[in-house]
Image (spheres, rainbow, N blue to C red):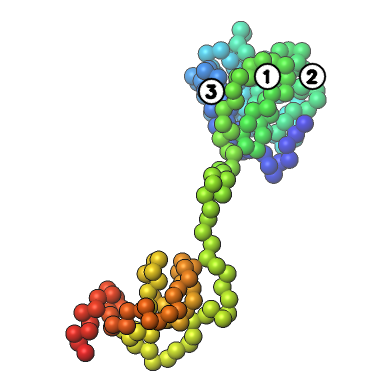
Amino acid sequence: MGIPKDNQLTLDEAYQATYLWLDHTGDPPVEILEPAHGSVELHTAKAFVRVRLSEAPVEQSSVLALLRAADAGKKLLLFSPSGFSTSALSIAETQGIALFTLDPHGRAIPETTHARTASPETEPDPPFAPDAGDEEDGLETYAPPPWREEDAEPEVEGIDAGTSDWSDCPACGSTHYRNAKFCKACGTRLQTDTSHVDTRMRCRNCGSHDIEKLR
């Protein structure tokens, strides 16, 4: 079976996933050949490994090519994000070749008996699996209360920034018109009782009340 082309790994990603899988099994590559004709070849101490990418599921010709190129006495492993044809699976079973399909996350799926035998007891973490979101980690992403037109700050002209018509958000310190109900920066509800608001003049830049001395 093949994987839709739009969801397939690239050859470089398939190589990375294969390398990590081999390293996880305790038989890391000791030699890596340059990619050629949609394939990357890796040699380990125990295995002759090839990563193959094709437009369609890998055919038996690629399996036979691996068989001809391999060193005698080594295990033969073929990984592909493209999947394998029925004829490729059949010839691999008869020749003792392990075929693995790499899913879009880089997980190696054994397709033949020898592939299942070669698979480790615990699979490595797939290298291209999506990261869990903050919500899955038990963390909630803050969302300010929905904005309503009646909460909008009034359009007021001629108000000096240093007068008591302005107040600070108690949570983040952003400056708002005194009658605003919510902080537009962080969403905190603002107090509307002006009896609790500091009515002294202050500097708009630093917040100092020393500006009172200039009156």
Q: Is mark 2 on a helix, strand or loop?
A: helix
> Mark 2 or mark 1, which is nearer the start of the sequence?
2
Vertical placement of 138 versus 153: above or below? above
Residue 77: percent from the left, percent from the top? 64, 19
The 10 Å Cα crowd at callout 1, few under 14, some 14 to 19, many 20 or more, is many
- Disc 3: which residue: 24
Image quadrant holding the C terminus, namely bottom left
Q: Is mark 1 on a helix, strand or loop?
A: helix
Q: Residue 115 — which label?
A: 1
The 10 Å Cα crowd at callout 3, few under 14, some 14 to 19, many 20 or more, is some
Picture residue at 70% right of the left edge, 33% below the top:
82
- Disc 2: which residue: 90
Whether residue 38 sits left or right of residue 89 in the image: it is left
Q: Is mark 3 on a helix, strand or loop?
A: helix
Instruction: Please say whether residue 37 is visible from this viewpoint.
Output: no
Residue 61: percent from the left, percent from the top? 74, 23
Residue nearer the viewer, 120 or 160:
160
Q: Closer to us: mark 2 or mark 3?
A: 3
The amino acid pointed to by label 3 is His
